[in-house]
Structure formats: structure tokens, C-alpha cells
Image (cartoon, rainbow, N blue to C red):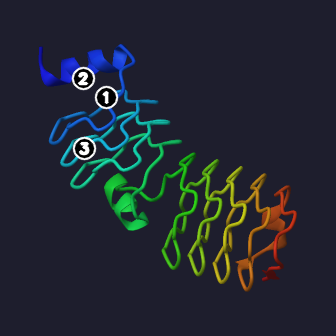
Amino acid sequence: MTAAENLKKQIADGRSLARANLSGMDLSGMDLSGVDLTGANLSNCNLSGANLKNAQLGAANLKGANLKGANLKGAQLELPVDDLLRKIGNAQNLAGYNLSGRDFSGLDLSGARLAGADLSGCNLRGTDLRGTYLYEANLSDADLSDADLRGAQLRRANLTGSIRINAKIRKWAMKSAYIAGATAYTDE
């Protein structure tokens, strides 16, 4: 039995892969949804196109891993933002990702698809979010100070408790957004 076949059997049997040494393995296209990979060594793994939806990746070693095209929706990651964006290779489609508490300050995320993404508590200060699609995104308690949200779609987004001082945003873009307790913003 090959290493990949053995791994698939372990996953099918519902076994945890926490702290497993999977270094250098080709896991491309593999269904790892919901799998506990906490503390696993995934260094230099090919995870391109893998389904990692709701996977537990806390403290996992992803150094040199290829995550291009991987489904990371709801995955628990502890990567610095620049590493995450470089590894997934496409900052344009982060729809549904759990990105809560991350520091995106000053980054260019213009045109990104962030529908349903969890951006709660994120530092988005000075971030270029022009033309982003934030439908049903969770931006609660996020700092959007000086962010450029011109042309962003915020329908049904949760902006509860967010800070938007000097943010460039139009009131109409926030139609049906939930904004209770948010700090004032400027309207362009």
C-alpha cells in the first residue's frame, strides 16, 4: 500500500492526523475536509486543489507547501497573512475563508471575492478594498480606518462594532448591511 493510499484509509477510518509527518507528500486533489491536522508536518507538501474545508491546521508546518487552488473555507490556519496569500496563489478568491483576527493593513485586496468570509477583528487599516465583493462577510469589530471601499459590495455584511474612521465608502454600498455599534465613517 502506498503512503497516499494509507493516508486515505486513515482519513476514511476517521483517524486524526494531528502531529502526523506528511512532509513532501503529494496530497493534491485529496479530500481532507474536516480532518484534524493540528501540528502536522505538511512542509513541502503538494496540497494544490486539495479540499481542506473546515480542516484543523493550527500549528501545522506549511513551510514550502503548495496550496494553490486548495479549498480552505472554514479551515483554522495560523499563517501570517502574506504567507497565506502567497501560498494560495490567488488573493482574489477568499470567499468563505475564516480569516478572523488577521492583519491585512495596507494590503491591496482590490477586486477580491470575500463573500461570506470571516474578517471579524481584522486590521484592515489603509487596505485597498476597492471593488471587493463582501456580500454576507463578517467584518464585526474590524478596523477599516483609512480603508478604500469605493465600489465594494457590502450587502448583508456584518459591520457591528467596526471602526471606519476616514474610510472611503459610499452609503449606498452598505444597503442592508448590519452596522449596529459601528464607529462613524466618512461618505464620499
**Screen quadrant of the C terminus:** bottom right
Would you say 66 lies left or right of 151 here? Answer: left
Would you say 53 lies left or right of 32 here? Answer: right
User: Marks 1 and 2, how far apart in space?
Assistant: 10 Å
Which residue is label 2 attached to?
A: 7
- Badge 2 amino acid: Leu
**Height in image: 172 above or below 2?**
below
Label 3, secondary structure: give it: loop
Would you call the spot at circle 1 few (<14 residues within 10 Å), some (14-19), or many (20 or more)? some
Q: Nearer the viewer, mark 3 or mark 1?
A: 3
Would you call the spot at circle 3 few (<14 residues within 10 Å), some (14-19), or many (20 or more)? many
Which residue is label 1 attached to?
A: 30
User: Marks 3 and 1, how far apart in space?
Assistant: 14 Å
> Is the C-beta separation of discs 1 and 2 under 8 Å?
yes
Q: Residue at x 61, y 59 (%)?
A: 119
Which residue is label 3 attached to?
A: 42
Instruction: Point out the tag, 1 or 2, that comes first from the N-terminus.
Output: 2
Would you say 136 lies left or right of 66 here? Answer: right
**Screen quadrant of the N terminus:** top left
- Badge 3 amino acid: Leu
Q: Nearer the viewer, mark 1 or mark 2?
A: 2
Instruction: Point out the tag, 2 or 3, that comes first from the N-terminus.
Output: 2
Q: Residue at x 48, y 43 (%)?
A: 75
**Front residue of this view, candidates 54 and 176:** 54
